[in-house]
Amino acid sequence: MLPNKSVFPLWESSCLTRRERELVEVLAHGGRVVDFMNKYGIAKSTAHAHWGNVKEKLEVCDRSEIFAHHQIFLENQ
């Protein structure tokens, strides 16, 4: 679950794998799953599997929640 106030970048969450952290970082900066897929040269099905894992682990519904969380983090810096 995403905290109300961010004290660390979301992609530093300890529950995420390395690839999931990379995906969250792309999404936090306004990217899309396809951008992650292209950046790291992975298959669409693999990218979407990582996205499914991220949604479950962080309890988010869409990438806008990750982006908004990152904006809060930046405001608190």
Image: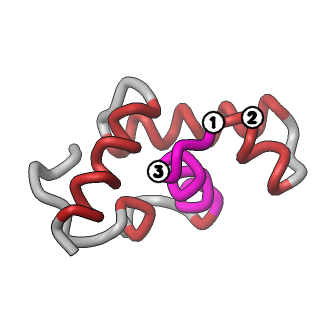
Residue extending furthest toward the bottom: 77
At numbered mark 1, what does the secondary structure look like: helix, strand or loop? Answer: loop
Q: Which residue is mark 3?
A: 28
Q: Secondary structure at mark 3?
A: helix
- Tell me the quadrant of the picture where the C terminus can be found: bottom left
Q: How far apart are the two marked residues, 1 and 2, measured between alpha carbons?
A: 5 Å
Q: Are marks 1 and 2 in contact (CB under 8 Å)?
A: yes
How many other residues sit within 10 Å of disc 1, few (<14), some (14-19) or many (≥20)?
Answer: some
At label 3, the amino acid type is: Ala
The reply, left or right, for residue 38 in relation to residue 11 is right
Amino acid, disc 1:
Arg
Say the numbered circle drawn on residue 73: none
Q: Looking at the image, is 75 positioned above or below residue 63?
A: below
> x, y percentage for residue 43?
87, 38
Q: Nearer the viewer, residue 43 or 38?
A: 38
Q: Of helix, strand and loop, which mostly describes the magenta segment?
A: helix
**Disc on the earlier residue, 3 or 2:** 3
**CA neighbours of label 3 inside 10 A, class few (<14), some (14 to 19), many (20+):** many
6 versus 8 height, above or below:
above
- The location of residue 58, given as percent across then percent down, is 33, 44
Q: Which residue is mark 2?
A: 34
Q: Which mark is residue 32?
A: 1
For the N terminus, the image quarter is top left
Q: Which residues are magenta?
A: 19-32
In magenta stretch: residue 38? no
| Horizontal arrangement in the rendering, residue 53 relative to residue 43 (left or right) | left
Farthest-out residue, top: 61
Relative horizontal placement of residue 56, taking residue 23 as reference (left or right)? left
Q: Position of residue 39 (x, y in %)?
A: 81, 54
